[in-house]
Image (cartoon, rainbow, N blue to C red):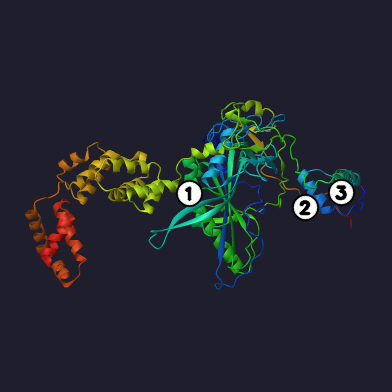
C-alpha cells in the first residue's frame, strides 16, 4: 500500500486519527479517506439553506407526546435468555476484558494515516 | 453484591482469587474538562512563593442520587440493591436490538420534587440526549442523559456547620445549584485481576439517577460535607432518593482547584471514589493540600481524575492512556421532549396519568429539614444546634417529642437529657434510637420524678443507668428498690454537710481563703455520702452558709 500525501486542508491527520480512535474504523487507503471527504461535501450542501430564525429540529417526534409509564415491575428475571448470547460468562456474570484497551498513538500504529517521511 | 461474589470465590477459591476481585472505581471518565462546574477556568495559577501568598480553594460537587422507584428509568425491570447478578435486567437494559426507552413517570416526579425543594426553576420542556463512551458496563455504548436542557436549573441549597474551638458556633452558607438532570445509571464491573477479566452485572444498568450539579461556591471539605449532608436529608425527607452513600445511592465527585485571591482560578482535578461524607471532607482537604504543596514547590496541576484511597487517606491519579473523551452528544432520537405542566397550562380532558403537574407536586411537598428545625426551635425553645442534632438521627425528633408530651419538664431541659444522656449512650453502644433500651415513656416517667423533686439529678442519672440495663422495671420501682428518694430532711442534710466539712479541714481552709472551686469537691463528697440522694443546689446552699 502506497503512502500518499493527504489531500484537503480541512481534513487533517489529527481529525482522521480522532475519527479512527472514536469509531474504531480504519480508513485503510486513500480511497477510504476520499469517500469520507465526498460524504462531507455532500452533507455541506445543507449550508446552502438559510436557516436564520428557524428552530432546529432534533427529533421528528417533537410534536408527539412523551408517553409516561407507571412505576410497576413488568420485566426482568430473564438471566438465562440474556447470558445465552454472550460468548463468555461466569456464574451469571458477563465476562469482559480487564479494561478499555486504548488504541496506540498514531506514530505507534500501523495505519495509512502515518505520514511518510 | 457481596453474597454473590462470595459464591464465586468459594468455587474458585484460591488464595489469589480472594484478593483478585474488586469493584474498582469507574475508570472511564478519564478527563475532567467536561461541561460541569461552570466558573472554573482551566489555567495554571502561578506557583506561589512558599508560605507567602494565601491560597483559596474552590470546590464544586457533582452528585448522583439514585431515584427511589420500583422500576428503572426507561424500562420495567426492578430496582433493588442485592439480587442475583443479571436477574433485574430487561432486554432494553441489556441493549438488545429492537428495544426502546419508555420513561417512568415516578422518576420524573422525583426530579421535579427535588428541583422544587432546591428552589430551582423547573423547565417545562426538557430534552434527552445520548452521551457516548465505550465501557463494558454500558452495553448501549451511550448513556441517556439531559445535557442540553435538563429538567431543573438555577437553584440553591443552604447548609450549616459548627465552627469555633468548641464547635458551638453555627455558620450558614448557601451553594448554588446549577442544574438537576435525569440520567441512566450504568451496570457494575467487578475486576478480577488474577484472571485479567471483568465481571459485568447489569442489575444497576438503567436505574434512574438525578445528577445534581453544584456551582463551585465552596472552599473546604467541611463545607462540602455539610452541603452533602443537608442534600441527603432533603432527599430522604422527599423520598425521591434514600441517598444511602454506603449502598451507592448517593455518589459524590468533587472538583477541586486552588488559586491566590484576585488571580485566575487554578487547574482543577476531579476526585472520585468517595464512599462516605466523612471521606468526602478528608478527600477534598487532602487534594487542596496536595495542590498547594505541588504549586508551592514550583510544580503544576494536571487537569485529571484522581481516586480517593480511604485507607491511605490520599488521592491517586487515574490518568487513563485514552486521553480526553469526546462524548459526541446527540439528541436521543427515540424520545420526544418532556413536557411538564402546571395548573394554568394543564390541558383539559387529559389523562392525569400522562401528565406531571408541577403545582400538584409543589402543594404536596413535605416540610424541608430547615423548616422542621425552625419549627422545633420555635415550638420548644431549644437551640438551633440542638435542632440539627435532632434531625441528624433518624427517629430522634419523634422520641424527643414523645418525651416532651408525657412530661412536665421544660423541653429546654428535656433536650439536655436526650442529647447528653440518651444520644451519648446510644452512640457508645452503636445503637439507633429505635433500638434504645429505654423507651420514651420510661424516660418521661423518670424526668417527672426529677421535676417533682422526688429524686435529685444525680439519682436520676443512676436510675437511667439502671433503665438502660433493661430489666423492665419502671423508674419508680428502681427508685424505691434502691432507696434513691431525695433526702428531704433539712436537719439530716445539715448533719451530713457538717460531718464532711469536719473530715476535710484542708478543703475548708482553701475555700475560706477564696478558692471557691474546691466547694464543688465538697458538694461531690456529700453526694457520695448520700448516694446521690441530696439535691446539689440545697447542699451548696448549706455549705456556703456554713463556710461564710
From where the camera sits, is residue A49 visible? yes
Q: Which residue is mark 3?
A: A112
Q: Secondary structure at mark 1?
A: helix
Where residue B245 appears, x then y in whole percent? 51, 44
Tell which of B40 and B508 is nearer to you.
B40
- Asked whether the beta carbons under mark 3 and mark 1 sit within 8 Å of each other, the answer is no
Where residue B110 appears, x then y in whole percent? 55, 38
Tell which of A49 and B261 is nearer to you.
A49
Chain for mark 3? A
Q: Nearer the observer, disc 2 or disc 1? A: 1
Q: Residue at x 65, y 26 (%)?
A: A81
Tell which of B261 and A1 is nearer to you.
B261
Chain for mark 1? B
Q: Residues within 10 Å of mark 1 (few under 14, many from 20)?
A: many
Q: Which residue is mark 2?
A: A105
From where the camera sits, is residue B249 visible? no
- Residue B336: quadrant of the picture: top right
Quadrant of the snapshot with the C terminus of chain B: bottom left
Where residue B96 appears, x then y in whole percent? 70, 31
- Label 3 and label 1: CA atoms lie apart by 56 Å
Mark before the other along the chain sequence, 3 or 2? 2
Judge whether B85 appears above or below B265 on screen.
above
From the viewer's perspective, tell me whether residue B494 is left or right of residue A108.
left
From the viewer's perspective, tell me whether residue B306 is left or right of residue B526.
right
Amino acid at each position: 500500500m502506497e503512502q500518499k500525501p493527504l489531500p484537503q486542508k480541512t481534513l487533517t491527520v489529527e481529525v482522521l486519527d480522532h475519527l479512527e480512535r472514536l469509531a474504531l474504523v480504519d480508513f485503510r487507503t486513500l480511497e477510504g479517506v476520499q469517500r469520507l471527504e465526498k460524504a462531507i461535501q455532500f452533507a455541506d450542501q445543507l449550508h446552502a439553506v438559510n436557516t436564520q430564525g428557524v428552530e432546529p429540529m432534533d427529533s421528528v417526534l417533537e410534536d408527539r407526546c412523551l408517553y409516561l409509564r407507571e412505576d410497576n415491575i413488568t420485566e426482568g428475571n430473564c438471566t438465562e435468555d440474556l447470558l445465552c448470547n454472550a460468548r463468555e460468562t461466569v456464574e451469571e456474570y458477563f465476562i469482559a476484558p480487564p479494561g478499555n484497551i486504548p488504541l496506540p498513538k498514531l506514530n505507534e500504529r500501523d495505519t495509512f494515516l502515518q505520514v511518510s517521511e | 453484591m457481596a453474597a454473590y461474589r462470595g459464591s464465586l470465590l468459594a468455587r474458585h477459591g484460591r488464595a489469589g482469587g480472594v484478593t483478585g476481585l474488586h469493584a474498582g472505581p469507574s475508570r472511564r471518565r478519564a478527563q475532567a474538562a467536561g461541561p460541569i462546574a461552570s466558573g472554573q477556568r482551566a489555567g495554571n495559577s502561578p506557583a506561589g512563593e512558599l508560605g507567602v501568598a494565601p491560597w483559596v480553594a474552590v470546590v464544586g460537587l457533582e452528585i448522583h442520587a439514585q431515584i427511589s422507584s420500583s422500576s428503572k428509568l426507561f424500562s420495567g425491570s426492578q430496582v433493588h440493591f442485592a439480587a442475583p447478578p443479571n436477574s433485574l435486567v430487561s432486554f432494553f437494559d441489556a441493549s438488545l436490538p429492537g428495544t426502546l426507552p419508555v420513561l417512568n413517570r415516578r422518576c420524573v416526579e422525583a426530579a421535579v420534587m427535588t428541583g422544587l425543594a432546591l428552589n430551582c426553576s423547573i423547565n417545562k420542556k426538557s430534552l434527552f440526549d445520548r452521551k457516548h463512551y465505550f465501557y463494558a458496563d454500558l452495553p448501549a455504548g451511550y448513556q441517556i442523559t439531559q445535557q442540553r436542557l435538563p429538567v431543573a436549573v438555577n437553584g440553591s441549597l443552604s447548609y450549616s456547620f459548627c465552627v469555633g474551638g468548641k464547635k458551638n458556633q453555627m455558620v450558614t452558607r448557601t451553594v448554588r445549584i446549577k442544574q438537576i438532570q435525569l440520567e441512566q445509571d450504568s451496570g457494575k464491573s467487578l475486576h478480577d485481576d488474577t484472571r485479567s477479566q471483568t465481571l459485568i452485572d447489569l442489575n444497576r444498568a438503567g436505574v434512574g439517577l438525578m445528577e445534581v450539579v453544584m456551582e463551585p461556591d465552596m472552599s473546604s471539605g467541611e463545607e462540602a460535607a455539610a452541603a452533602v449532608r443537608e442534600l441527603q436529608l432533603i432527599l430522604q425527607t422527599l423520598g425521591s432518593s434514600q441517598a444511602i452513600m454506603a449502598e451507592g445511592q448517593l455518589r459524590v465527585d468533587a472538583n477541586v482547584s486552588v488559586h491566590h485571591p484576585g488571580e485566575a482560578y487554578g487547574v482543577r482535578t476531579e476526585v472520585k471514589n468517595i464512599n462516605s461524607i466523612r471521606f468526602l471532607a478528608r478527600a477534598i482537604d487532602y487534594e487542596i493540600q496536595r495542590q498547594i504543596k505541588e504549586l508551592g514547590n514550583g510544580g503544576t496541576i494536571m487537569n485529571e481524575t484522581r481516586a480517593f484511597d480511604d485507607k491511605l487517606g490520599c488521592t491517586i491519579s487515574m490518568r487513563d492512556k485514552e486521553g480526553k473523551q469526546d462524548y459526541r452528544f446527540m439528541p436521543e432520537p427515540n424520545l420526544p421532549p418532556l413536557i411538564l405542566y402546571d395548573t394554568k397550562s394543564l390541558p383539559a380532558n387529559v389523562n392525569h396519568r400522562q401528565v406531571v403537574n408541577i403545582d400538584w407536586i409543589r402543594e404536596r411537598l413535605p416540610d424541608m429539614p430547615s423548616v422542621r428545625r425552625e419549627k422545633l426551635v420555635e415550638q420548644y425553645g431549644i437551640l438551633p444546634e440542638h435542632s440539627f442534632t435532632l434531625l441528624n438521627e433518624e427517629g430522634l425528633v419523634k422520641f424527643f417529642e414523645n418525651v416532651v408530651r408525657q412530661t412536665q419538664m421544660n423541653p429546654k431541659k428535656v433536650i439536655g437529657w436526650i442529647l447528653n444522656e440518651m444520644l451519648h449512650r446510644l452512640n457508645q453502644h452503636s445503637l439507633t434510637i429505635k433500638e434504645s433500651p429505654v423507651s420514651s415513656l420510661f424516660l418521661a416517667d423518670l424526668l417527672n420524678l426529677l421535676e417533682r423533686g422526688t429524686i435529685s439529678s444525680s439519682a436520676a442519672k443512676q436510675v437511667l443507668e439502671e433503665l438502660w440495663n433493661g430489666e423492665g422495671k419502671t423508674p419508680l420501682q428502681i427508685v424505691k428498690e434502691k432507696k434513691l428518694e431525695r433526702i428531704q430532711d433539712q436537719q439530716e442534710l445539715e448533719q451530713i454537710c457538717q460531718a464532711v466539712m469536719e473530715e476535710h479541714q484542708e478543703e475548708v481552709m482553701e475555700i475560706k481563703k477564696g478558692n471557691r472551686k474546691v466547694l464543688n469537691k465538697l458538694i461531690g463528697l456529700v453526694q457520695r455520702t448520700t448516694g446521690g440522694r441530696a439535691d446539689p443546689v440545697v447542699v451548696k446552699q448549706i455549705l456556703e452558709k456554713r463556710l461564710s
